[in-house]
Image (spheres, rainbow, N blue to C red):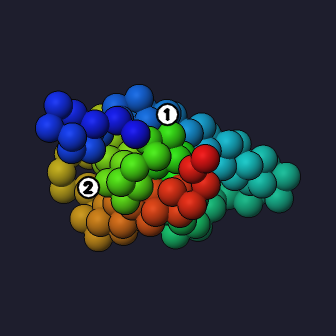
């Protein structure tokens, strides 16, 4: 457990970065599976709601990993992983749309999902 000079629990940046990397790794794997599905079935598109669900699962997995590595305040580390995941994803892939392209409800659900992932991640700390 990491603490600051006053004995308060600190935030583990390393754990947040590891969780965020797992989120991006998971979304990459899910994207490859979707691409293979589209190629094999000769389907022109994939339902957008499933893409959101897979992103949510990726954020929750990363939140769980971040909390597991931090070993403290799982919900907070999960939330911060989700926030960084969304921010980096927006900067890499969504800037050209501007803020009008953002769906605030999906952002909120993703942050809640990553926080819940962080809570579950605390169950697997050693």
Please state the horizontal and vertical placement of residue 55, each as a whole percent of the image.
Answer: 51, 55
Question: Which residue is painted at 36% across and 54% down in the image?
Answer: 73
Q: Which class describes the residues within 10 Å of circle 1: few (<14), some (14-19), or many (20+)?
A: some
Question: Which residue is painted at 85% across and 52% down in the image?
Answer: 40
Q: Which class describes the residues within 10 Å of circle 2: few (<14), some (14-19), or many (20+)?
A: few
Say whether disc 1 or disc 2 marks the residue closer to the N-terminus: 1
Query: Which quadrant of the structure image shows residue 74?
Result: bottom left
Question: Which residue is painted at 46% across and 63% down in the image?
Answer: 119
Residue at label 2? 101
- Residue 88 or residue 6, whichever sits in front: 6
Residue at label 1? 18
Say whether residue 58 is left or right of residue 35.
left
**Quick one: SS at disc 2?**
helix
Which residue, as the protein is rendered here, is positioned at the far right? 40
- Residue 14 versus residue 41 in the image, above or below: above
Please state the horizontal and vertical placement of residue 53, each as a whole percent of the image.
Answer: 54, 65
Quadrant where the image shows the N terminus: top left
Please state the horizontal and vertical placement of residue 116, each as a whole percent of the image.
Answer: 44, 66
Residue 97 seen anywhere in this rendered image of the structure = yes
CA–CA distance in space, label 1 to label 2: 28 Å
**Quick one: SS at disc 1?**
helix
């Amino acid at each position: 457990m990491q603490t600051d000079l006053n004995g308060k629990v600190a935030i583990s940046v390393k754990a947040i970065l590891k969780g965020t990397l797992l989120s991006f790794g998971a979304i990459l794997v899910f994207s490859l599976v979707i691409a293979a599905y589209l190629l094999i079935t000769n389907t022109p598109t994939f339902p957008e709601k499933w893409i959101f669900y897979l992103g949510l699962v990726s954020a929750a997995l990363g939140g769980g990993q971040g909390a597991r590595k931090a070993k403290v305040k799982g919900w907070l580390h999960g939330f911060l992983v989700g926030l960084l995941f969304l921010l980096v994803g927006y900067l890499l892939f969504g800037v050209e749309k501007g803020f009008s392209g953002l769906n605030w409800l999906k952002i909120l659900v993703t942050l809640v999902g990553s926080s819940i992932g962080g809570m579950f991640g605390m169950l697997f700390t050693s």
